[in-house]
């Protein structure tokens, strides 16, 4: 059987500082965390990507988008993450994380559910520059294959890497044309060896308020090179993998774009925020 994720899945983490501990739900599947108000000082949004090790997932190593709100002081944090991957059961799967930040490093544990199968693990990261962090993550028990009725099957890797950047940073710059403000055009120049590109748009205020990706996702686009090359620009809402939500005048949105090769290695990453006039 050829293992194939039905669409590219994104692991999206909303990470905030907190004063008192947040409780989780009972049972084997963690309950989604309640929205957490950042405290005691203003956290900063970091956006980036994670990758699955091609050794740990030889079938289909898949990168995804990663969002974190990091505190600017040494403190504990708690948050919620979402696999915006459409699992074989068609659910929108979520989980919890917790950890602590010390100086230019942070680490913690995570637990999440895909298709009613619980995964847990750890993550650790250190600052790689004044605008970015790099780190690694592991899954308890290592890699695991999941096979469902019909052709749907996939591997969840046992480990991988991640990189996050401050807003408006990355490995290259992208353009946002607002001549038609409710149908913005996003432009980018990708590496020649890229085999796929993915773009996501989120409501920034919604994310900041702890709304979670299930509420804050506005649009997702993915394209795979079948021989004619990848696009250098896309228009909001055209070629969706999830249906576009209407953009609202006066709202600020976040857009990320990344490309990767056949081994699941990310080649290009950019992010930007834009205000609809």
Image (cartoon, rainbow, N blue to C red):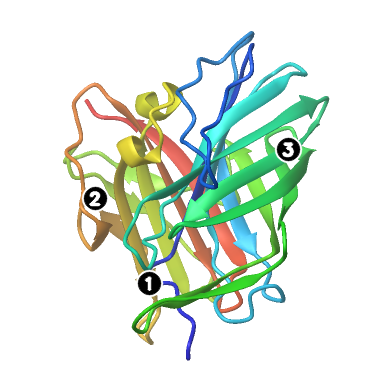
Residue at 51% across / 41% down in the picture?
81
Residue 117: percent from the left, percent from the top? 51, 59
CB within 8 Å, label 2 to label 1: no
Q: Specify few, some or many for label 2: CA neighbours under 10 Å numbering under 14, 14-19, or 20 or more.
A: many
Residue 236: percent from the left, percent from the top? 24, 50
Residue 18 image label: none
Residue at 20% across / 58% down in the picture?
238
Marks 3/1: CA–CA distance? 29 Å
Marks 2/1: CA–CA distance? 22 Å
Q: Secondary structure at mark 3?
A: strand
Hey, which residue is sitting farthest front in the picture? 27
Task: Choose mark 2 or mark 3, whichever is in front.
Answer: 3
Q: Earlier in the sequence, mark 3 or mark 1?
A: 1
CB within 8 Å, label 2 to label 3: no
Residue 31: percent from the left, percent from the top? 47, 36
Q: What is the quadrant of residue 58 in the picture?
A: bottom right
Marks 2/3: CA–CA distance? 36 Å
Residue 108 image label: 3
Left or right? Give the position of 50 relative to 103. left
Residue 103: percent from the left, percent from the top? 83, 25
Left or right? Give the position of 81 relative to 235. right
- Quadrant including the C terminus: top left
Per the image, the residue denoted by label 1 is 6
Q: Specify few, some or many for label 1: CA neighbours under 10 Å numbering under 14, 14-19, or 20 or more.
A: some
Per the image, the residue denoted by label 2 is 236
């Amino acid at each position: 059987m050829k293992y194939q994720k039905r669409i590219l899945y994104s692991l999206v983490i909303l990470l905030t500082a907190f004063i008192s501990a947040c409780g989780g739900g009972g049972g084997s599947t963690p309950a989604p965390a309640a929205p957490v108000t950042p405290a005691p000082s203003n956290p900063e949004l970091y956006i980036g990507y994670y990758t699955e090790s091609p050794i740990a997932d030889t079938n289909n190593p898949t990168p995804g988008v990663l969002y974190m709100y990091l505190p600017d002081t040494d403190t504990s944090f708690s948050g919620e993450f979402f696999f915006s991957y459409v699992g074989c059961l068609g659910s929108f799967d979520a989980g919890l994380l917790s950890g602590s930040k010390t100086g230019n490093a942070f680490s913690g544990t995570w637990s999440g559910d895909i298709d009613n199968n619980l995964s847990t693990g750890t993550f650790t990261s250190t600052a790689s520059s004044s605008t970015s962090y790099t780190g690694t993550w592991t899954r308890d028990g290592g890699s695991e294959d999941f096979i469902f009725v019909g052709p749907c099957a996939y591997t969840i890797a046992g480990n991988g890497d991640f990189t996050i950047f401050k807003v408006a940073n990355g490995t290259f710059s992208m353009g946002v044309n607002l001549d038609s403000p409710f149908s913005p055009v996003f432009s980018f120049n990708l590496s020649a060896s890229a085999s796929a590109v993915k773009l996501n748009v989120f409501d920034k205020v919604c994310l900041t308020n702890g709304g979670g990706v299930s509420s804050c996702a506005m649009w997702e686009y993915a394209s795979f090179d079948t021989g004619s090359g990848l696009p250098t620009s896309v228009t909001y809402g055209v070629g969706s993998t999830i249906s576009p939500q209407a953009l609202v005048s006066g709202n600020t949105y976040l857009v990320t774009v990344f490309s990767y090769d056949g081994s699941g290695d990310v080649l290009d990453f950019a992010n930007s925020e834009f205000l609809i006039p």
